[in-house]
Image (cartoon, helix red, strand yellow):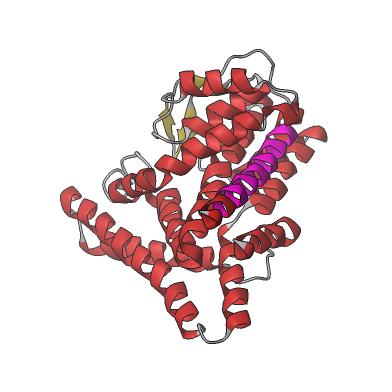
Amino acid sequence: MIDVIIAVIIDWIMGDPYWFPHPVIYIGKLIGFLEKRGRCFIKQDKYLKLWGGLIVLLVSFICYFVPFIILKLLRDTFWVKHIVNILFLWTTLAARCLHKEGIKVCYSLERNDIRDARVKLSYIVGRETSQLSEEEIIRADVETISENTSDGIIAPLIFGLIGGAPLAMLYKGINTMDSMLGYITPKYKYIGFFPAKVDDIFNFVPARISGMLICLSAPIVIGSIPKSIKIMLRDRKNHKSPNCAYPEAATAGALQVQLGGTNTYFGEKMYKPTIGDKINHLNEKHIKDTIRLMYTAEILCLIFSVILYSAIRLL
């Protein structure tokens, strides 16, 4: 528990420094390498699908057992083991990074530099951004921050609390595979099938917890907890993913805005239902409010975890 709390504080202070050799970079390189090797030798769709499953097994094995073995070797050096565990846990968290990259888009819009806002947004979303309007840019930024409140913060926190750095890194590897391969476009439909499905399984519980935590955070942005819960439950299925709509709908309910709709990925339009009610028109303030919801949800997660941990120890 203490290791996780320290990792969260380090993330708030440092985020992901550009000079630091972040494990996700190497996980991404491994996934990219395996994808390219598979495409070189496999031409049939059904075998490409199986190759995607093998990528999941290989990457998951490496992501779990590398930190597991390192920590096992350090088991007799108490302080060193905990420092290394904290460092691993820190690299699985993304609150500061989400804040930093999301607010850059906001600042560009406040300068009325929509071209720069599109470029900044392209660094953190998979959709095409070159033709987006100001409102579409804000919507994409809010959706990304809210979705990644689950994927990049609450989920690794939960897995880190349950199984320490190895389980948190395993989750990070699975989530990275989904980010790189889990699209339903023709190019990724087969090789990304298993990465997407496994990610759905691992995010099933964290997404729902994240949604509820965001709902409970609604007062921080002058929102209503009951209304946020109502929107989350009503629109929880309005997404291609069985999980993403929970944090997005909770955010939409808290901000009283409408998210979702049509996006373009790799030149192909993806039609999606809307989430939330268009009571307020999206503006730059909603990006800042989404960041506030993100941090509050993370703090609530830690508070509830400490309470649960203390209750279990007393039993």
- Residue 227 placement (x, y as % from top left): 60, 17
Residue 68 visible here: yes
Viewer-proximal residue among 6 and 146: 6
Q: Residue at x 27, y 59 (%)?
A: 39
Part of the protein shown in magenta: 288-309
Q: With 42 as the anchor, is 315 left or right in this view?
A: right
Residue drawn 70% across the image and 22% down it = 223
Quarter of the rendering containing residue 250: top right
Q: Is residue 299 magenta?
A: yes
Residue 73 location in percent, x, y?
47, 85
Asked whether the viewer can see residue 114, the reply is no
Answer whether residue 70 is magenta in the image.
no
Residue 15 figure quarter:
bottom right
Q: Please indicate whether residue 34 sits to the left or right of residue 226 in the image.
A: left
Secondary structure, magenta segment, majority class: helix
Which of these two is toward me, 205 or 270? 205
Compare residues 222 and 132 and report the one nearer the observer.
222
The residue that appears at 65% across and 24% down in the rendered structure is: 254
